[in-house]
Amino acid sequence: MKFEIKNYSKLFKNGAGINELSMEFNSGDIVGLIGDNGAGKSTFIKCIFREYEKDTGEIYLDGENMQIKDLRKFSLFPDQSIYPSGISIYDFMYYTASLSGIKNKEIKEIVLKALQAVNLLEYKNKTFKNLSAGMQKRALLANALITKPKVLFLDEPTANLDVKTRVQFLDLLKSLAEQGMAIIITTHLIDELAQIINRLVIIEKGEKVFEDVINKTTDIRKIYQDVTISSSEKINLSVFTSN
C-alpha cells in the first residue's frame, strides 16, 4: 500500500507549526523523521491524529483520499501516562480494545496476540509500574498494535533506554516492518536511525528540507548538518590543522 501525506499545514499565532509538509512511503518502509526541538515533528503527528485541526492537507491511500474511517489504519505509540496504576497490562489492553470498536468475542485473542508479538505474554498480569523500562516500552507498543494498524507512528520511542534494550526494541520494529507495517519514527538519536530506516525525512522550522531513500551506509549526520546548519554556524577546524 502506498501512503501519501500532502501539504499538511498548521500555523500558530506565534508563527510556529508546520507549513505544507509532505511525505510518502509504502508498506514495509521505516521512515526516520528528524529535526530539532520545535521543528514541527510533534505538531505534524498531532495533526495526523486530529489532536490539532490542520489548516490544509490531505492523506491518500493508494491514490484515494483517506476517509475518517481509515484512521483505524494508523496507530500512535502512546505515552507512558496512558497506563493507570493498579491494573494489569492485559486488563488495560482489553479496555483499550473495547473502546476501539473491536467485537467482544475477538478482544481476548487480539490482546493476547499483541502481547505475544512483543514477547510479553507471560507478563500479562503484571502492572505497568512493575515492569522494567524495556518491558514498559514493549507494553506501550503492544497497546498500539491492538487495532492491527497499517502505519505506526512512534515519537522518541527509545528515550531513556539503555543500549541493549534499545537494540532489542528496534529489532521488534524491524520485524513489524518485515510483516508489511509502515513505521514512522521521530527521534533525536540520529546515529541510531541508520541501523533501521530505509527512508529519511528532515524537518527544519516547520518545513521539509530533505526526503530520500537511504541505506545503512548513508551518513545521516552529514546530511542533517548539510541541510540544517548554515556555513556560518559550522565549526571550521581547518584553522587548527593548516600549516
Image (spheres, rainbow, N blue to C red):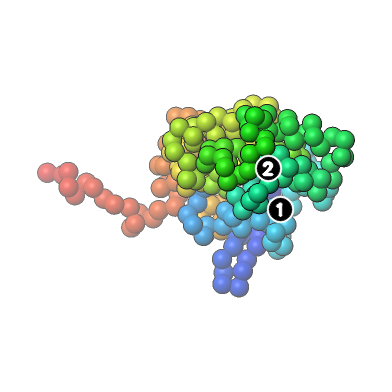
Residue 121: x, y in percent?
Answer: 67, 30
Front-lying residue, 53 or 84: 84
Residue 154 image label: none
Q: Is residue 175 left or right of residue 34?
A: right
Q: Position of residue 141 (x, y in %)?
A: 64, 39
Marks 1/2 in contact by CB < 8 Å: the verdict is: no
* Nearer the observer, 22 or 182: 182
Q: Quadrant of the C terminus?
A: top left
Please name the amino acid that badge 1 sits on: Phe
Judging by the rendered image, the residue that carries numbered circle 1 is 49
- Earlier in the chain: of badge 1 and badge 2, it is 1
Q: Quadrant of residue 241?
A: top left
Residue drawn where x is 59% and y is 62% of the image = 17
The picture places residue 22, in percent across and down from the top left corner, at 64, 50
Q: As drawn, which residue projects farthest toward the bottom?
A: 13
- Residue type beneath disc 2: Ser
Residue 243 seen in render: yes
User: Of helix, strand and loop, which one carries label 1?
Assistant: loop
In the rendered image, the residue lying farthest to the front is: 86
In this view of the protein, which residue sits in the foreground, 228 or 137?
A: 137
Instruction: Name the front one of labels 1 and 2.
Output: 2
Q: Residue at x 52, y 41 (%)?
A: 133
User: Label 2: few (<14), some or many (≥20) within 10 Å?
Assistant: some
Residue located at (71% from left, 53% from top)? 49
**Tag 2's secondary structure?**
loop
User: Is residue 22 placed above or below 135 in the rendered structure?
Assistant: below
Indicate left or right for 204 with 3 as reference. left
Is residue 197 shown above or below 240?
above
Q: Which residue is mark 2?
A: 88
Residue 57 appearing in the image: no
In the displayed image of the protein, which residue is found farthest to the left? Answer: 243
Q: Is residue 3 above or below residue 51?
A: above
